[in-house]
Amino acid sequence: MRYLLENKNQVKPELSTLRFAWLILSFFYCTLLTGQDLPRPLNPPRLVNDFVGLLSAEQAARLEKDLVTFNDTTSTQIVVVIVNSLQGIDANYFAYKIGESWGVGQKGRNNGVVLLVKPKTSDSRGQVAISVGYGLEHVLTDALSKRIIEQQIIPFFRNNQYFEGIQAGVKAIMLASTGQYKAMPRKNGDFEGSPWFALGVLAFMFFAFFLSLIQSRNRRHTIGRHAHNDIPFWILWGSMLGGSGRSRGSDWGSFSSGSGGFGGFGGGSFGGGGASGSW
């Protein structure tokens, strides 16, 4: 597998305008997400939280061993979370909320990372997201997280090789957190780094936010049952940045794997850094 790639300094700086807008809008939009259920950490605590049974017991144990060793030697906590639904929420925000609510990373160092996977099904796209704690944002940037998803994870997922994709993503995140990972450049003509692209997406985000706010108010005059599962803003926002998909229901299952030697999360904080993708 290719974890360490050539071409130094090829990653473009992340779009600070989009990042700032995402944080502001997520703050206001979270008022519309009341009633959403997030998965709770498995008990006993572990770094591989497979709520679907996607991985075999052996695969989960191998990942857990690597992640626990990395946690013990660097104090950086990388947690893998596999769910069968995002409940209509944007993958970036879903991963961020897991990192915040679980307290992934060490308190004060905020060195946690969440690798979120929602497998592809017959009626919904697969989605993956990387959410980064405050303390790692300078090395595991938004742009670099996007490259890891595109170059290391999704190529395996497209072939239904979930373990291989997660393993490749985890190892790339480990290298990036220590400043050793270098991603391949995007193809020529990529417009994602253009300021016009940033302004366009920013305008789209505000428009989608107010549209979804109006729709939410209108739904309050109807039955309102399961209305929180229909969240146009996050679906549209995910579509723009490669994290869209249809999902239904909320069933986290009861799958657990291995016992591991992980002692629990340390209370780290997240600031919305990271990226997402779909296939």
Image (spheres, grey):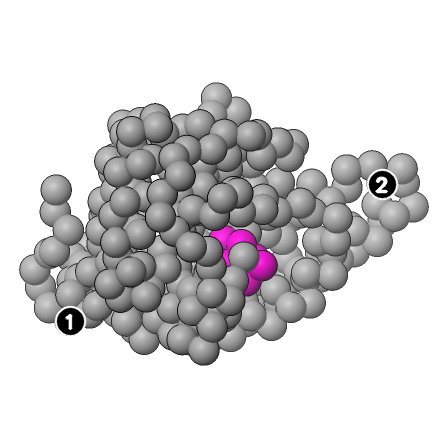
Q: Which residues are magenta?
A: 95-101
For the point 85% across and 40% down, the residue is 224
Whole-number angstrom distance, CA of label 2 to CA of label 1: 50 Å
Three-letter code, disc 2: Gly
Does the magenta stretch mainly form a helix, a strand or a loop? helix
Q: Which mark is residue 9?
A: 1
**Image location (x, y in percent) of residue 74:** 26, 66
Q: Taking the image as drawn, is residue 3 in sight?
A: yes
**Image location (x, y in percent) of residue 7:** 9, 64
Q: Which mark is residue 224?
A: 2
Q: Earlier in the sequence, mark 2 or mark 1?
A: 1
SS at circle 1: loop
**Image location (x, y in percent) of residue 46:** 43, 46
Quarter of the image that includes the C terminus = top left
For the point 20% across and 60% down, the residue is 175
SS at circle 2: loop
Image vertical order of residue 21 relative to residue 6, above or below? below
